[in-house]
Amino acid sequence: MMNQRLAVAAADITSLAAGAEILVNGVAGVCDPLGGLYLPDHGVLVVSDLHLEKGAAFARRGMMLPPYDTLATLNILSAVIARYDPKTVISLGDNFHDRRGSQLMPQPFRDTINGLARGRDWIWINGNHDPDGTFDLPGQCADELVYGGLVFRHEPSLVAGKGEVAGHLHPSATVGRRGKYVRRPCFATDGNRLVMPAFGVLTGGLDLKHKAMHGLFDRAALIAHLLGRDRIYSVRFDSLIG
Amino acid sequence: MDNSPAEPLSQTVDLLPRPFTDWFALKGWSPRAHQMELLSRASGGENILLIAPTGAGKTLAGFLPSLTDLTRRGKLPPGAAFTGVHTLYISPLKALAVDIERNLMKPVEEMRLPVSVENRTGDTPQSKRQRQKLNPPDILLTTPEQVALLIANKDAGRFFKDLKYVVLDELHSLVTSKRGHLLSLGLARLRRLAPDLTTIGLSATVADPMDLQRWLVPQNSGPEGAPAPPAGLVHVTGGAAPDIKILSSDKRIPWSGHVATYAIPEVYDEIRRHKTTLIFVNTRFQAELIFQELWTINEDNLPIALHHGSLDAGQRRKVEAAMSANRLRAVVATSTLDMGLDWGDVDLVVHVGAPKGASRLAQRIGRSNHRMDEPSKAILVPANRFEVMECQAALDANYLGAQDTPPVGEGALDVLAQHVLGMACAEPFDPLELFGEITSASPYAELSWEMFERIVDFVATGGYALRAYERYAKIRRTKEGRFRVSNPQIAQQYRMNLGTIVEAAELNVRLVKHNAKGTIGRGGMSLGKVEEYFLEQLVQGDTFLFSGKVLRFEGIRENECLVSNAFSLDPKIPAYAGGRFPLSTYLADQVRAMLADPARWHVLPDQVRDWLALQREKSMLPARDELLVETFPRGQRFFLIAYCFEGRLAHQTLGMLLTRRLERAGARPLGFVATDYSLAIWGLNDIGEMIARGRLSLADLFDEDMLGDDLEAWLDESFLLKRTFRNCAVISGLIERRHPGKEKTGRQVTVSTDLIYDVLRSHEPDHVLLEATRRDAASGLLDIGRLGAMLLRIKGHVVHRPLDRVSPLAVPVMLEIGREPVAGEAQDAVLAEAAEDLIAEAMG
């Protein structure tokens, strides 16, 4: 089926969707079906793994992927920013698909980001794909950020899990009923920490049951908040297939 | 081989050099009339199509022009100037190329002909391939992919300058696929490199040979670009009619399914009674299951082997060798053994499942008794009750005589893109010249210049309206207006990714052991490959059949699927065993006729007859031109069954479209399942009642206009289209299967083609690759042509039968309802239910 996030962004729906309200280390958040996390008490919107200019990164290696992924991702980002009008936007790393991405990005996309950032604080957390930070874009770059009782970093760390909001893993989850199954990107949280779904339109997912996720969560308390068309579906880890 | 020559001896002597006449005399044979006719006409430079049944000496006929010409030329003296390859033999199967080498070397050695023969396939070692380029054999036996590789090489001109004959084996099966399209383009290039070459096509019987005759010649080579005359035809008819029976069994014939395990004891008895039996099935899983069941009752320990494409190549070679040495009593095989392999002493072919298509069945049956003048012996084993009718209808209609015609089809655009890059790798090309060459290939004769330009643009920069990638272009124009590759790495990438067979993502299956600590050990034997989609439904501990063993799924480690011996006879996961080939239109009509005419039922087994009689009593049997639609409630759901008899692909498309319409009508459909014979849709609202109250009209529901907007809208979000897109993306070179230094399996393609499809769809819906995808899907996976013909046929003939329970005829399709991924609207319903369970759990 048509990617529901692309469809929603194309339809320019700015009304509030049925997000899921969660607590991470006692901080209230709303998981939005477009893939962003909004922290109402702080006016902060968190997105992760935008992987901007992924198509161009492949084209540099001879695979001419459609040059529309940046535009599509920014459209969804615009939609979610319009929904919450946040004071601060935190992009949790892998903001660009490769090191050269933010340097070589065409001007129109730069203009879009400038427009989105106007009147807000913007924090680019560095990721493993783009460890050198961004080039000629508004906002600040940082390896991690401690703010409002939470730690924002790209890669989840095994030692300091409490209050951590991270990305990197692109979590997705599968649910099934009567032999039918559906796989979707998801927010994953056990109340202590949160791993964000990947926001970029050309980013795949890694199943929450994959071994790379082992040891991150208290599985008894782990809930996957799956991205649906216009709402979030919350499913306990034990009820997932995989 | 003792038919007397039809032509005067003097002509034979003229055409056949001394060693050949001596050899025939020594063997006590005479050359057959068609062999001499082909020799005489091809030697005169005429392109020729030879149509002959199995066992007619087709292979020798195809090579006689080359062998005699090379014999007259004599052995090249040492130190002679470089001489290119003389004859190219192209077969659809690697195994066939290897087998032909063996068969061809026999006469070559016995006559001591000064002819060198070698094969070149994907399995040929790199050192030998290098040597072949420097010192080509006279006759090179190869596959379409290798031809594409050779012509994309810088030295192609030198290698092929002396090419005189191109022999195309099993042409009827080659031309129908994308491989055939690629080969037709390759042939066009070969003709440019060696303008005087002659083509010789070898084919099994087809209904209309003209398509193949045209395929063999350049399309625009006549005066002022007019079509050239088609290739000449040598048609060998006759051969003894095959002796075909339907297996009769005392056992209960299943309602549904495709594996025919009920008939295993009878099949085993037949194996015992014959020297060597070939058991053909339609899918790998059928092969696995039949093989296992046979061994379960193999009290005599007969040597029975298994052969299918997913098995390890080494294992397959062993089976082939044992087979040709007559050490086996039976082989269970899929289409990997369909074609021309010479098996010697096979005296029985068992075909599990219904015929589906005539040419395939004829060819498979032709495997037995590989001599033209004796009848081949075959037994059909229907796997379910509908198949009993299908088999019977096939025999009643003398179906084997009524051959299908292979559709050549319009040349695929993704294949064209691949070829264009290949030609740039060979040497810088002039677009006008290349266009002329490409349109000389019959599948591309109608290609427009505008489309060709779009494809060239696609190859260069992806062909996007947003010109973002000019600086990364793969091919660029030189000052002279020619296109060349931007750097040598592009050519290397092209060579690594060439070909038109896109395999489903597959993982290697490795057998491991549990060690003392209960963890899984490393190493162990490789058993073959299994598709990723199958593994996706497994969890650790599930057992399934593979490579003739019941295996326990242990998990996936990197690119490998780890399994252990299950020490059980009862696999838990039922293998998907649906027929891969849809029911042919002709057979479908025959089955409908039989269903409508009780006078013809006397030939059917009692059980099937009783079943039909019960259907007549409980519901009804539709007339030949009618479409019966039944509705009934079952469980919490309401069902609609349509008996269309148009094959699974067309039914699947129909199911998708009807589901959309039912959704709009408020029937709240939840899913559907399709078989070759019928379609079942189920939903939450009572469809029967909606029809009764006039809230839903069946005539409107089945109106042809569904092929308009509904089809367009559905195509845009269809997962089938995504699968087609994946193939097009890989074949066209948008996505690489392999990258230098990084061997990628389908699993590791670093970016999901589904995501690419979504982005492209929403931002450039007219992109050339999406157009290629829609064309492909319409003719292939969706079978839209056939669906359209059916909707036209049943207009005004839809009969509704509301029932209060499932009908006898509906049972087979109801039994198929099972584990299928859901698509579209229903996805969120599954999510919602899963989430509601959580809520209930929390509230409870």
Image: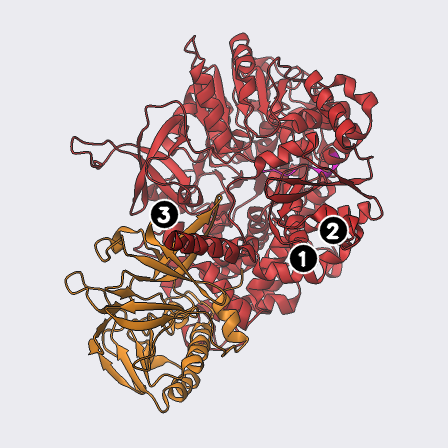
Chain colours: A orange, B red
Q: Label 2, on which residue?
A: B690
- Answer with the quarter of the image where residue B7 lies: top right
- Expressed as whole percent of the image width and height from the top left, the position of residue B88 reads 52, 41
Looking at this view, name the residue that lies furthest to the right. B796
Name the residue rendered at 37%, 74% in the picture.
A52
User: Looking at the image, is mark 2 or mark 3 nearer the viewer?
Assistant: 2
Which segment is the magenta one?
A: B579-586
Label 1 neighbourhood size at 10 Å, few (<14), some (14-19), many (20+)? some
Residue B666, which numbered label?
1
Label 3 neighbourhood size at 10 Å, few (<14), some (14-19), many (20+)? some
Q: Secondary structure at mark 1?
A: loop
Q: Amino acid at mark 1?
A: Gly
- Answer with the quarter of the image where residue B311 lies: top left
- Answer with the quarter of the image where residue B542 lies: top left
Q: Are marks 1 and 3 on the same chain?
A: no
Determine contact: label 1, label 3, CB under 8 Å. Answer: no
Q: Label 3, on which residue?
A: A242
